[in-house]
Image (cartoon, rainbow, N blue to C red):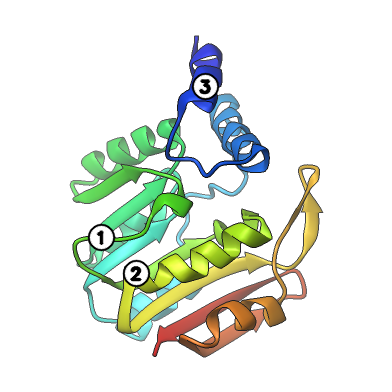
Amino acid sequence: MDCVRILNMVVTKRTISVGVPRLLMWLFFHWRYFIGKTPWDTSVTPPEVVELIEREKFPPGRALDIGCGTGTNAIYLAQHGFQVVGVDFVTRALNEARAKAQAKNVRVEFRESDVMALRTFDRPFHFVLDIGCFHSLDPYGRIRYADNSLRWTQQGSIVMMYVFFPRKMFGRSMGAAREEMEKLFGADYTLLQYADDDKSAWYRWERK
């Protein structure tokens, strides 16, 4: 029954950007959550995020978790005083995220949406977190993402991103080099921190 529902949603869903690659990616992630094979969902908030929030004492404010999955990082931010919106396009993941937030007695607003459909909110965010969403987009999607990010943020906002370097994964090209990231974001953001392990990189941008 779930498989039939997912296939029907692929045809009728309106929050997904037009184009076969995006639809296939949407179906891929729904299927992986359905069969329980989600190696990216570690249920552990990365130490890079903990460093910023707990050791550097980044002040709580409004936070946006893009591609929030089952809510691990959105819940972590809420536990540290942030007003959090978590966004993902996988219904099953969001249902689990809501259950986890309720069990931990924290309030997070979880929204089902494609990141390409995210343009404006009632107020901008002080902190935006993206662990693995951006690098799954095609080149056109990355341009739209960078443009939309200006609607999510304000001067001084921090955008923290974890991005694979270019590679082939699951039969498609993924990832972005540092040069591409700086070309897309450098005009509107200052790169405060960068670290890589030759396979992926963490970026911390500040909105100019």
- Residue 46 seen: no
Q: CA distance from mark 3 to mark 2?
A: 30 Å
Between disc 1 and disc 3, whose residue precedes?
A: 3
Secondary-structure class at tag 3: helix
Where 144 sits versus 159, above or below? above
**Looking at the image, which residue is at 43% across and 30% down?**
92
Residue at the spot of label 3: 6
Left or right: where does residue 60 sit relative to residue 44?
left
Residue sitting nearer the eye, 2 or 122 = 122
Depth check, mark 1 against mark 3: the one in front is: 1
Q: CA distance from mark 1 to mark 2?
A: 8 Å
Q: Amino acid at mark 3?
A: Ile
Decide: few, some or many residues near mark 1? Use Cα within 10 Å; few <14, some 14-19, many ≥20: few
Depth check, mark 3 against mark 2: the one in front is: 2
Between disc 1 and disc 2, whose residue precedes?
A: 1
Residue at the spot of label 2: 151
**Looking at the image, which residue is at 43% across and 75% down?**
159
Q: Amino acid at mark 2?
A: Arg
Q: Are marks 1 and 2 in contact (CB under 8 Å)?
A: yes
